[in-house]
């Protein structure tokens, strides 16, 4: 049996999937240890996982809106989003992440390290100790290192012509160049660890023996183009530990379930507009605000209930339409239940998830500042046009197969075989 060190940071939806993989390995007889932000200790404990917090590296203590480290909703442009990611996660604290990791490595003596894909300092620590390293992405791949995939962030479709291929390659190269602002900080950390400097920030990822993409092949674009050492591991999705039972509004009208990010993205205005739109329709609405927003901030009409959380898994079988920001888990889970989706993406991976839904005709997409009338019309279309539910059922069935055959634990056992 092997010993695995798992490392991640509090970034919302990517934490639980990594923990679910750790539990799978533990259930197979291996010893695992989680190294993450203090606020993730409850999530680890709920799965029976041993947990250690970061000590010198950034360690978020809560999951309220004021606790959010990136605050990328305040950024004015994509470059500022990248700058925040570089300064606050990837390169700025790389040495602190590396030192914390090395201290745990020396005490725990793992056979391999499994890390969330943005923690360059952890990767450098694994390199310094010559430990097998796997990266784990809990959604579609977000970094500009795959030239044959649509550029991340804008919700682009696969290229269908030489001109589009050229444009995608140019956007990817430009994005890759923007990330190089973090190279001096990364190389300074590497120097402290006795490692040689890199000429490209993303060369640090080349030290990984395996890169696991925890999404469904059926959901992603062009899955057959994914190069080695990337591998699809299937989706790892479940209700969060903080989800509590919630009463569904009474009646027989169709249920519209509304859920936006568990992180703060300044989503109040969009959520209020959605509530107003649902209130105009002959439906029942259940809105979950997540841990960063207080339901009391959202007055609702009689046919809409607003709660902080609810067990989505138990509700999706009753749901007619799902309205969401289109985060990875919030997109795949309704699809797996055959529920059509209205996507209102607000950033991060959400535009790209929404593009995959719309391309398969399993839902619709609107801007987050869409009007009450536009949102109500889209929900009505999803309710009345059965083709969306049929498409969601087809795509969802394929995703369920990928989930049933998810393989991260086996792939990580291969890492140390």
Image (cartoon, rainbow, N blue to C red):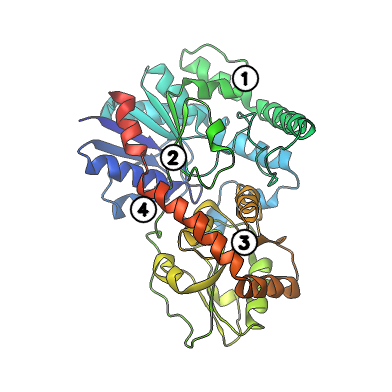
Q: How crowded is mark 2: few (under 14 residues within 10 Å), some or many (20 or more)?
A: many
Residue drawn at point x = 49 percent, y = 26 percent: 95
Quadrant of the frame with the C terminus: top left
Foreground of the two, 242 or 351: 351
Residue drawn at point x = 36 percent, y = 29 percent: 113
The part of the image, by quadrant, that contains residue 4 is: top left
Mark 2 and mark 4 residues within 8 Å of each other at the beta carbon: no
Q: Element at badge 3?
A: strand
Mark 2 and mark 3 residues within 8 Å of each other at the beta carbon: no
Mark 1 and mark 3 residues within 8 Å of each other at the beta carbon: no
- Eyeballing the image, is 96 above or below 197? below
Quadrant of the frame with the N terminus: top left
Q: Where is residue 131 in the image (x, y as percent from the top left)?
A: 36, 21
The residue where tag 2 is placed is 8
The residue where tag 3 is placed is 363
**Label 2, label 4: how many angstroms apart (C-alpha)?**
12 Å
Residue drawn at point x = 66 percent, y = 30 percent: 179
The label on residue 43 is 4
Q: Position of residue 292 (x, y in %)?
A: 53, 62
Q: Position of residue 117 (x, y in %)?
A: 50, 34
In the drawing, does residue 261 fall left or right of residue 80?
A: left
Q: Element at badge 4?
A: helix
Q: How crowded is mark 1: few (under 14 residues within 10 Å), some or many (20 or more)?
A: some
Asked if residue 254 shows in the view, the reply is yes
The residue where tag 1 is placed is 200
Q: How crowded is mark 4: few (under 14 residues within 10 Å), some or many (20 or more)?
A: some
Mark 1 and mark 4 residues within 8 Å of each other at the beta carbon: no
């Amino acid at each position: 049996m092997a010993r695995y060190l798992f490392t991640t940071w509090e970034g919302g939806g990517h934490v639980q999937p990594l923990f679910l993989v750790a539990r799978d390995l533990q259930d197979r007889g291996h010893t695992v240890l989680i190294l993450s932000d203090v606020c993730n200790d409850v999530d680890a404990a709920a799965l029976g996982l041993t947990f250690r917090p970061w000590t010198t590296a950034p360690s978020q203590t809560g999951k309220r809106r004021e606790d959010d480290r990136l605050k990328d909703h305040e950024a004015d442009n994509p470059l500022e989003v990248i700058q925040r990611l570089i300064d606050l996660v990837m390169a700025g604290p790389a040495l602190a992440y590396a030192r914390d990791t090395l201290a745990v490595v020396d005490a725990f003596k793992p056979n391999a390290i499994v890390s969330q894909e943005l923690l360059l300092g952890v990767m450098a620590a694994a390199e310094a100790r010559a430990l097998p390293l796997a990266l784990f992405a809990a959604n579609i791949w977000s970094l500009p290192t795959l030239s044959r995939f649509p550029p991340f962030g804008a919700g682009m479709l696969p290229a269908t012509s030489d001109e589009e291929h050229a444009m995608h390659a140019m956007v990817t190269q430009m994005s890759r160049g923007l990330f190089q602002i973090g190279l001096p900080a990364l190389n300074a950390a590497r120097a402290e660890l006795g490692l040689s400097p890199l000429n490209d920030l993303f060369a640090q990822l080349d030290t990984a023996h395996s890169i696991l993409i925890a999404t469904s092949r059926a959901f992603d674009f062009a899955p057959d183009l994914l190069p080695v050492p990337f591998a699809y591991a299937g989706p790892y999705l479940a209700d969060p530990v903080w989800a509590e039972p919630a009463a569904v509004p009474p009646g027989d009208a169709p249920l519209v379930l509304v859920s936006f990010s568990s992180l703060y993205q300044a989503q109040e205005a969009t959520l209020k507009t959605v509530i107003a739109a649902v209130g105009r329709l002959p439906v029942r609405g259940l809105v979950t605000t997540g841990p960063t927003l207080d339901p009391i901030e959202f007055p609702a009409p009689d046919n809409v209930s607003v709660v902080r959380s609810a067990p989505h898994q138990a509700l999706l079988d009753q749901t007619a339409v799902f309205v969401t920001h289109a985060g990875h888990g919030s997109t795949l889970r309704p699809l797996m239940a055959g529920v059509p989706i209205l996507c209102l993406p607000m950033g991060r991976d959400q535009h790209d998830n929404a593009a995959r839904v719309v391309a398969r005709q399993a839902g619709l997409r609107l801007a987050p500042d869409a009007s009450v009338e536009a949102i109500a019309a889209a929900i009505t279309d999803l309710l009345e046009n059965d083709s969306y539910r049929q498409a969601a059922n087809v795509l969802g069935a394929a995703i369920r197969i990928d989930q049933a055959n998810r393989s991260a634990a086996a792939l990580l056992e291969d890492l140390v075989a």
